Image (tube, helix red, strand yellow):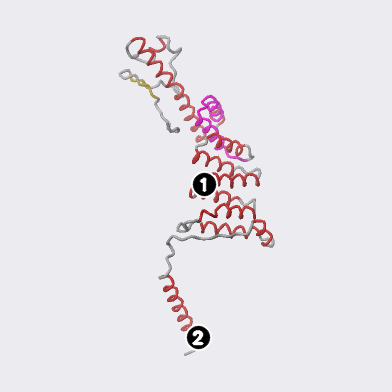
């Protein structure tokens, strides 16, 4: 047997032996069974020193490991360490944006700990002045998970104050004002957006909000006046114009498009042609 063949046989034998050992080991280990883990990390400032000038590389390695770790769903206690992990990464490189964004997403969505996510995003905003994304994400989590529209609006105000903040943040601010039932201020904000819109999406969004806000103001008034008309005349008005003739309204309001509201004289109901269900009642 030549030397080359001998080496090939030896290599093949080694691979078969390794495969056999791995198969035997795999049969004794439940890789996907629930288990606990323990994570211990030195402080981020210590790791900065120990990186010997390669702190970006160290932060990258930790960040990649963190994504893998928090994608291992059979580790039952993985969220016990999440704040320490992402605090360490962002202490090594405070200007590294992705760990704030991904870390807060895992905290809010998977760990369901929104206050923790807000702490991480507040840190990102504090250490990276001029970046709007951290305040935007914090505002979204307050809006989506906490339903705290006032706090969400504060975050969006901070985000919008940063140079280069996208125009949709202004729309979110106006939407939050609408959600916390301030129709007068919301109308002013949406009118400003509507008049200055440079794209169809922004203009349509503003139009829809103005339509809904006006309907939410007009319809309760009309329903109240219909009830008063029925009490006074012992019958329902044949048309909404009867309310004006009876002096119950100065003029019958129309929707933001300029169309009449839909009135059913048989039962006395009045509705708008379009309905946007942004509020849960």
Which quarter of the picture shows residue 263? top left
Distance Cα–Cα, label 2 vs label 1:
61 Å
Residue sticking out furthest to the bottom? 1
According to the image, label 2 marks what residue? 4
| Residue 259 counted in the magenta span | no
Quick one: 34 or 15, which is closer to the camera? Answer: 34
According to the image, label 1 marks what residue? 113
Q: Which residue lies at the image location 36% right of the left edge and 12% below the top edge?
A: 231
| Element assignment for label 2 | helix
Quick one: 189 or 221, which is closer to the camera? Answer: 221
Q: Earlier in the sequence, mark 2 or mark 1?
A: 2
Determine the main secondary structure of the stretch shown in magenta. helix
Q: Which residues are magenta?
A: 164-193
Quick one: 237 or 127, which is closer to the camera? Answer: 127
Q: Above or below — where is 105 with respect to 182?
A: below
Residue 6: x and y in percent read 48, 86
Q: Above or below — where is 148 with respect to 61?
A: above
**As drawn, is 260 to the left or to the right of 37?**
left
Residue 218: x and y in percent read 44, 21
Q: Which residue lies at the image location 55% right of the left edge and 60% below the top edge?
A: 39
């Amino acid at each position: 047997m030549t030397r080359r063949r001998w080496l090939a046989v030896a290599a093949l034998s080694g691979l078969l032996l390794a495969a056999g050992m791995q198969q035997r080991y795999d049969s004794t280990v439940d890789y996907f069974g629930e288990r606990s883990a323990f994570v211990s990390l030195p402080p981020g400032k210590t790791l900065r020193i120990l990186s010997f000038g390669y702190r970006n590389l160290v932060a990258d390695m930790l960040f990649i490991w963190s994504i893998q770790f928090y994608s291992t769903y059979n580790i039952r206690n993985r969220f016990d360490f999440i704040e320490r992990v992402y605090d360490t990464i962002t202490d090594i490189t405070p200007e590294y944006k992705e760990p704030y964004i991904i870390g807060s997403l895992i905290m809010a969505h998977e760990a369901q700990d929104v206050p923790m996510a807000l702490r991480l995003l507040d840190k990102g905003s504090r250490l990276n002045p001029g970046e709007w994304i951290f305040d935007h994400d914090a505002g979204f989590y307050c809006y989506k998970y906490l339903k705290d529209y006032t706090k969400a609006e504060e975050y969006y105000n901070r985000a919008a104050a940063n140079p280069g903040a996208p125009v949709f943040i202004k729309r979110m601010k106006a939407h939050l004002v609408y959600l916390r039932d301030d129709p007068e201020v919301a109308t002013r904000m949406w009118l400003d957006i509507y008049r200055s819109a440079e794209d169809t999406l922004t203009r349509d969004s503003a139009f829809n909000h103005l339509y809904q806000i006006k309907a939410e103001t007009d319809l309760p008034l009309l329903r109240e006046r219909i009830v008063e008309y029925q009490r006074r005349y012992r019958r329902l008005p044949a048309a909404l114009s009867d309310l004006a003739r009876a002096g119950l309204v100065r003029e019958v309001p129309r929707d933001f498009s300029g169309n009449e509201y839909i009135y059913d004289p048989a039962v006395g109901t009045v509705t708008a042609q379009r309905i946007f269900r942004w509020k849960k009642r």
